[in-house]
Image: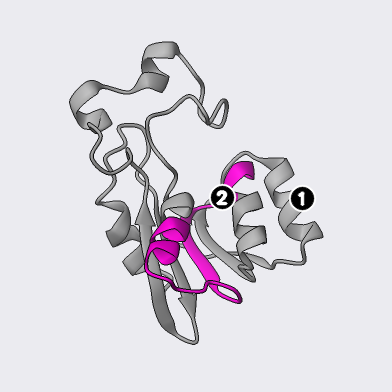
């Protein structure tokens, strides 16, 4: 989990710094953090669209310049031809519903997270998919 928190420091999000790792057979497959797509100006430069529009955390995920860390970790693996089927996601936050659906379809088999996220449907889908979810307390790993 220490590595996940280190990866999160690369985030360019003004609201929340999130980091993610995909691990399989004790090897890191890919890392991801939240921020604007490659080549686009970061929120650090142009401000937070969600703040400007008054959108509460956890709502209207599509109204954001950035991608979530979980999306970016899957994209990084795909760009480098790395299969993530059977991997474990380590993340600073429990994935939102959108990321949860992507992780399920990518074949991720377990989720370990540090902080909660108010998304009951995400938790329900992870449970229905048979994906174990573990909260790692402070100082874990």
The quarter of the rendered structure image containing the C terminus is bottom left
Task: Tell me the SS state at disc 1.
Answer: helix
What's the mark number on residue 124?
A: 1
How far across and how far down the image is residue 112, in percent? Answer: 55, 65
Q: Which residue occupies the extreme bottom position in the image?
A: 25
Residue carrying label 2: 95
Residue at x 51%, y 29% (from the top left corner): 57
The quarter of the rendered structure image containing the N terminus is bottom left
How far across and how far down the image is residue 46, in percent? Answer: 23, 22
**Cβ–Cβ under 8 Å for marks 2 and 1:** no
Q: Which residues are magenta?
A: 73-99
Q: Quadrant of residue 51?
A: top left
Q: Nearer the viewer, residue 60 or 51?
A: 60
Q: Is residue 96 visible?
A: no
> In terms of sequence position, does the residue under pointer 2 or pointer 1 come before the other?
2
Q: Is residue 76 magenta?
A: yes
């Amino acid at each position: 989990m220490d590595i996940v928190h280190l990866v999160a420091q690369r985030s360019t999000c003004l609201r929340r710094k999130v980091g993610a790792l995909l691990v399989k057979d004790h090897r890191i497959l890919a890392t991801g953090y939240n921020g604007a797509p490659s080549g686009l100006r970061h929120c650090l430069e142009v401000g937070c669209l969600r703040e400007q529009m008054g959108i509460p955390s956890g709502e209207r995920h599509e109204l954001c310049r950035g991608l979530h860390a979980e999306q970016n970790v899957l994209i990084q693996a795909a760009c480098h031809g790395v299969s993530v089927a059977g991997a474990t996601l380590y993340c600073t936050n429990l994935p939102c519903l959108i990321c949860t659906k992507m992780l399920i379809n990518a074949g991720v088999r377990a989720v370990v997270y540090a902080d909660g996220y108010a998304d009951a449907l995400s938790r329900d889908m992870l449970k229905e998919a048979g994906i174990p979810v573990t909260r790692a307390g402070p100082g874990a790993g």
